[in-house]
Amino acid sequence: MDLKQSGQRFGDNEYKRKLDQCIHCGLCLQACPTYEVLGREMDSPRGRISLIRAAAEGRIDLTAGALQSHLGLCLTCRSCETACPSGVQYGAILDVARLAIEQTRRPGYIERFIRWLALRQLMPHLPCLKAIAWFAKIYQIMGLSKLVRAVNFLPEHLKALEGSLPPMPAHYSNYKYWMLKYTC
C-alpha cells in the first residue's frame, strides 16, 4: 500500500490533527501490553505518539533506530483505542508511520536476500516447506537444538527464532498438517 493510497500522508495536516487528538492523559497505559511488560514511556501509546509527532515535525529522523525499535515493539492490538477518552485512532497513526518508515528505509543486501529467499523461493512452494520441516525434525532429533542453546553463539534475533521453533512431533509423517497446525 502506498502512502497516497492510504488517504493520508505522513506529516500532512490531517495526520498531524490525528496526532494532536492525544491529550497524554495516561489512560492507555494499563491497556497496553508492551508498556505493562517493559514499563518504559516510549513503549506506551502516548510515548509512541510523541515519537511519531517529533518525526512528523522533523525534529527526529524518520529512520532513527530508536523510533523504529519502539514502533516495532507495538503489537498493534489497539486495546489503547478502547481506553482512550479522546478517541485517538492509534492504529491508523501507527500504520501510516510504519509505512513511511518502510518506504524511506533501504534494507541491506543480507535483508533483501533473506526476504527474496523466504518470501519468493520457499513460502510459495510446498515441497520446500516440507523439506524445511524435515530438516527441523532432524535438527531436534539429533539434539542440535540443545547444543546450539548450550553453546549460545547465535545473534539475538536468530536466538529468538530458534527458541520459537515448536517441537516436531514424532508421530506425524505428514508435515503439511504439522505446518498448518503451528503456522495458522
Image (spheres, rainbow, N blue to C red):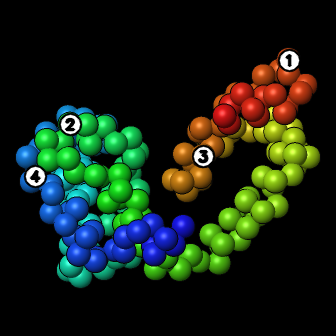
Q: Earlier in the sequence, mark 4 or mark 2?
A: 4
- The residue identified by callout 3 is 161
Q: Earlier in the sequence, mark 4 or mark 3?
A: 4
The one of 118 and 23 positioned closer to us in this rendering: 23
Coordinates of residue 22 in the picture (x, y in percent): 15, 55
Q: Residue 171 got which mark?
A: 1
The image quadrant of residue 61 is bottom left
The one of 44 and 131 positioned closer to us in this rendering: 44
- The residue identified by callout 2 is 83
**Label 1 packing within 10 angstroms: few (<14), some (14-19), many (20+):** few
Side of 145 where 156 appears, left or right: left
The image quadrant of residue 69 is bottom left
Coordinates of residue 175 in the picture (x, y in percent): 85, 31
Residue occupying image coordinates x 19% and y 53%: 46
Q: Earlier in the sequence, mark 1 or mark 2?
A: 2
The quadrant of the image that shows the C terminus is top right
As helix, strand or loop, the secondary structure at mark 1 comes to: loop
- The residue identified by callout 4 is 24
The image quadrant of residue 19 is bottom left
Q: Distance from label 3 to label 2 (Cα)?
A: 33 Å
Q: Earlier in the sequence, mark 3 or mark 2?
A: 2
